[in-house]
Amino acid sequence: MIGINTEIIRIEDNDNLLKPAADCLRNGGLVAFPTETVYGLGGNALLAQSAEKIYRVKGRPSDNPLIVHISALDEAEKIGERIPDSFYRMAEAFWPGPLTMIVRRKAEIPYSVTGGLDTVAIRMPSHPIARKLIALAGCPVAAPSANLSGGVSPTLAKHVIQDLNGKIEYIIDGGSAQYGLESTVISLTGDKPVILRPGSITYSMILEILPDTLLHESLIGTVQDLEEKPSSPGMKYKHYSPKAEVFLLYGTDEKIRSYMKEHDSENCCMFLYEKQEKSDFCHTYNLGSDKDLSQSASRIFAYLRDADEKGYQRIYIPAVPEKGVGLALMNRLKKSAAGNSIKL
Ligand code: AMP
Ligand code: MG
């Protein structure tokens, strides 16, 4: 696998270019492609060896299941068994889009795709290139984020090139990912629906469709709790970690500012909301308005990667309230910061 020639396809208006990548995917090759959440690393979800290749090139533990991507709703029936009515109500409200649903697995989906579980995660992405690629491939597509395991998810093709060039057959460049955070994951296999991973489809949006939905207990607790009771296999692993050390700062604007001033230096950078004064720090990144956290969500992974490219050693980031998209953003940032959550 390692050392193969990766073809990088830039899709402008000629999407005939997708055909060879789709053929390669169907026949067992790996293709990285843009979605509206982050870039995905796709393989044929019906072939055990494609899933095994995905784990190998990412360095992903093989008990961390993959999400199966589809391009039309009727494909879900070939993947899931005894699909509940709640699945169709959620699909009607949020698909195509950044929502993954977990149902019982059909035997055709290899255990290597589901990490040995009898359940399977399904998503229908809205990105036109993703949809077209899956439809042309003519098979469901198993795709985790197209980064090396443990690192920061890719929101631009250049991030995928940094991590996977020479290891997979194709990388499709479709520009910048719209949402920038991975999909919301909800399990529909228990008595009540449970959100396992927060994302851009928020808890309150889901409650409007399925009012008895619960948040997994690890999403309400602390970082330490997360290590003890992961919500799904993937959530127990180190994740979203740049090389730099990340510090997540909890406190008022004034306290955060004075802490940042004390710790500012040439080898650090500060992630700031628009309202925060930038002029007296060495290096800053603009997270946009704290009234609309979808902006910060769409920028955060690219900033973490850029900070590494610039060689900064420490990154300081203000914490935000864990509501709406803030719940998803903080879920990722707490993992990036590992033990470095600082209450001011
Ligand atoms: P990624 O592919 O990097 O977006 O990660 C997919 C996420 O979905 C991981 O956190 C997985 O653990 C989770 N996931 C996928 N399939 C299942 C499943 N059958 N049960 C529980 N969680 C799942
Ligand atoms: Mg991932």
Image (cartoon, rainbow, N blue to C red):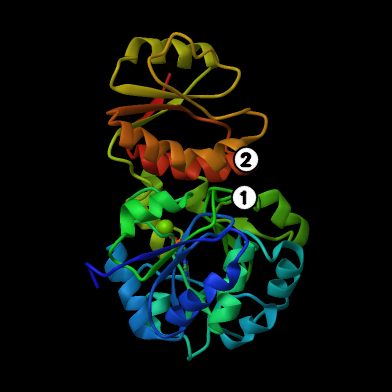
Q: Is residue 229 visible?
A: no
- Seen at 36% across and 55% down, the residue is 161
Say above or below: 269 vs 174.
above
Question: In the image, residue 182 lies at what x, y percent?
Answer: 52, 54
- Seen at 54% across and 51% down, the residue is 175
Q: Quadrant of ligand 2?
A: bottom left
Q: How many other residues sit within 10 Å of disc 1, few (<14), some (14-19) or many (≥20)?
A: many
- Count the labels in the image: 2
- Seen at 39% across and 73% down, the residue is 30
The residue under label 1 is: 200
Residue at the front extreme of this rendering: 14
User: Which is more toward the observer, 302 or 213?
Assistant: 302
Question: Quick one: quadrant of the N terminus?
Answer: bottom left
Which type of secondary structure does the marked residue at label 1 adopt?
loop
Question: In the image, residue 66 lies at what x, y percent?
Answer: 44, 70
Question: Quick one: quadrant of the C terminus?
Answer: top left
The residue under label 2 is: 294
Question: In the image, residue 79 lies at what x, y percent?
Answer: 56, 84
Q: Is residue 276 visible?
A: yes
Residue at the left extreme of this rendering: 3
Residue type pointed to by label 1: Ser
Say above or below: 15 vs 324.
below
Verify CB contact (< 8 Å) between mark 1 and mark 2: yes
User: Which is more toward the observer, 197 or 2?
Assistant: 2
* Apparent side of residue 32 relative to residue 101 in the rendered image (left or right): left
- Is ligand 1 closer than 8 angstroms to the Cβ of mark 1? no
- Seen at 47% across and 82% down, the residue is 23
Residue type pointed to by label 2: Ser
* Apparent side of residue 313 relative to residue 218 in the rendered image (left or right): left
Mark 1–mark 2 distance (CA, rounded to whole Å): 8 Å
